[in-house]
Image: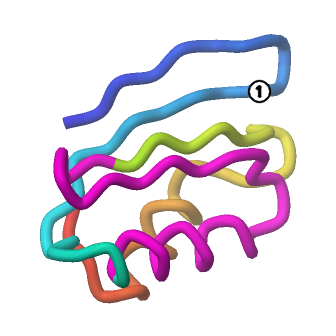
Amino acid sequence: MKKHTRKGNKEMKKTYKVEGMMCSNCEARLTRVLKAVEGVKEVIASYQTGKVEIDFDEEVVKEAVLLETIEDAGFDI
């Protein structure tokens, strides 16, 4: 599941359903790896809802990089 809205010319906010996020440690790990990606402004991950919301600059980072980062961290989308 993916939801997105434009915040400005360059900024996007997207929400993804993430499988495998089972606890607060998973939530913290996903937040940490996504925040390390250049162009990511804010990350809100919730293991309780199984979703992650990402604010990012689409001119700096592409959605494919975000998805790959999530999968590389051990989660499924």
The quadrant of the image that shows the C terminus is bottom left
Q: Would you name the residue on which mark 1 appears?
A: 11
Numbered range of the magenta stretch = 26-51
Please give the count of numbered marks on the rendered protein.
1
The picture places residue 46, in percent across and down from the top left corner, at 32, 53
Q: How is the image coloured?
A: rainbow
Q: Is residue 2 found left or right of 22 in the rendered image?
A: right
Give the vertical position of 9 relative to 28 (above or below): above
Q: Quadrant of residue 21?
A: bottom left
Residue 8 image point, x, y percent: 81, 12
Locate the N terminus by quadrant. top left
Q: Residue at x 58, y 28 (%)?
A: 13
Q: Is residue 3 above or below residue 71?
A: above
Say if 16 sits above or below 14 in the image.
below
Q: Which residue is nearer to you in this view: 72 or 55?
A: 55
Does residue 42 show up magenta in the picture? yes
Residue drawn at x 66%, y 51% is 62
The image quadrant of residue 55 is top right
Q: Residue 71: horizontal and vertical position, in percent? A: 35, 78
Q: Name the residue at 82% across, 53% down.
A: 39
Q: Is 21 displayed left or right of 66 in the figure?
A: left
Rendered location of residue 10, percent (x, y): 83, 25
- Looking at the image, the residue that sits furthest to the front is 24
Number of other residues with Cα within 10 Å of mark 1, as a class: few under 14, some 14 to 19, many 20 or more: some
Identity, as a three-letter code, of the amino acid under mark 1: Glu
Q: Nearer the viewer, residue 33 or 9?
A: 33
Q: Secondary structure under badge 1? A: strand
